[in-house]
Amino acid sequence: MSDFLSQFFSPRINLQEETNWATDFVQNVIIPRLPEAVAGHFSVELGTVLVMVAFAGIFVAVVPLLPLVLVLAERKVAARFQNRTGPMRVGPWGTLQTLADGIKLIFKEDFIPPQGDKLLFLLAPYVIFACSFAVFAAIPFGDGIPIPGDFNIGIFYIMAISSVIVMGVIMAGWSSNSKWSLLGSLRSAAQIVSYEIPLGLSILTVVMLVESLGMKQIVASQDGGIFTWLIFRTPFTFIAFFIFFISSIAEVNRTPFDLPEAESEIVAGFHTEYSGMRFALFFIAEYANMFAVSAIAVTLFLGGWQGVLPGYDFLGGFPGFVIKTLGLVFLMMWLRWTLPRLRVDQLMNLCWKYFIPISFFNILGTGIWGLIFRHDDVWSIGISCAIIYVGLIGAYAVAGRNLARKPEPQASSV
């Protein structure tokens, strides 16, 4: 326990582990295919740098395609919920609609408020865009698939990078020289900073069980099938998963937590004054964040690339990881077109009065559970699943009783 605490409070980045995959690729793939005269003088260090630069280039080129697909998927999901067809004109079944919208935004006028702060106005979308995509560098998509940021504090890196997004939000609102944009940015900053607390505390329950901040180590600890996934490992991580997922929805400003887009003001929040491709960067970053937080939830609680059945690759590997992640993304879209928007006081009450105390309770319960069950075995997982099942039945009974209760008649005001 003392070794874990010393590692947690003074973490060190393992650079050798970070560049190992690139060095192996150079030594085992590139150098054997070079002519002997060149291979004898080829520097492994230079090859490692070139491989990492090429991999980062491919990464930056492929990842921005995700928002194009997710925007189209959301428009189709919204159309299905509202009993309509959605975009159908551009491409077969409307599949090229988002590409056409992107081309349109490229050629639209790039408006900059004349009385605003031009430098901050130009930098804000790039700060949000860069931080949103930098999170993907530490997400393990599959066993054997190299990731740019494979170091031993992966989840700490993700939390640090995602926290910088709030700076871009404040920059966008302040530099627009608009009271509506400023109010939207302040609401968004308060929301993001508040919900980072229960989100981080939920992650801490996973770190306490795995005793590691590395993303690959967290996935490797869930390799025994669905019942060894951390969501079922203890009753407290089961609760922590839902707090994490709901807090992540608030982090990315999705409905019912999209308070920056206030109905009373009929504006779009902190990016009201943006147009053209700079507005598209905010839009792309939002959908990239949706996929990123869903992928992190899958990695921490739903087994990552591990399969459902031990010894079988069902819902495992890279395809299984993507399927589970897209399932959570679809759930976010489902909630958007189902639930009404919360008021700002309801939003803050949910965080500070409920999520944060429950998160501290989860940390305490996880610590006690670890003292009682020092090793995960059939008995500990069985007891955990039984408690979760009884808790779900009790919650369902309480919710059904409250929904079936008839409202009391109100006195007439006439």
Image: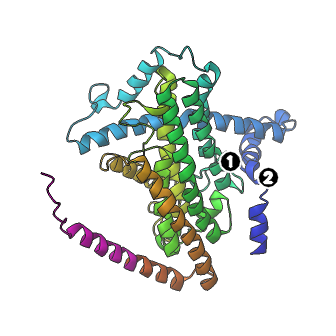
Work out whether residue 229 can be spotted. Answer: no
Residue 345 point in image, percent of width and height: 43, 50
In the depicted structure, whether residue 29 falls above or below residue 88: below
- Residue drawn at x 79%, y 50% as measured from the top left: 15
- Residue drawn at x 67%, y 54% as measured from the top left: 156
Residue 64 point in image, percent of width and height: 52, 34
**Cα–Cα gap, marks 1 and 2:** 12 Å
- Residue drawn at x 59%, y 56% as measured from the top left: 143
Q: Is residue 38 magenta?
A: no
Disc 2 secondary structure class: helix
Task: Using a 10 Å C-alpha cutoff, classify the residue at mark 2 as few (fewer than 14 neighbours), some (14 to 19) or many (20 or more).
Answer: few
Residue 293 point in image, percent of width and height: 52, 50
For badge 2, the amino acid type reads: Gln
Locate residue 326 relative to residue 82 in the image: left or right: right
Q: How many marks?
A: 2
Residue 216 point in image, percent of width and height: 63, 59
Task: Using a 10 Å C-alpha cutoff, classify the residue at mark 1 as few (fewer than 14 neighbours), some (14 to 19) or many (20 or more).
Answer: many
Magenta region: which residues? Answer: 390-414
Q: Quadrant of the N terminus?
A: bottom right
Front residue of 289 and 320: 289
In the depicted structure, whether residue 151 falls above or below residue 202: above
Disc 1 secondary structure class: loop
Mark nearer the viewer, 1 or 2: 1
Residue 149: mark in rendering? 1
* Residue located beneath label 2 in the image: 16
- Residue drawn at x 59%, y 52% as measured from the top left: 140
In the depicted structure, whether residue 333 falls above or below residue 87: below
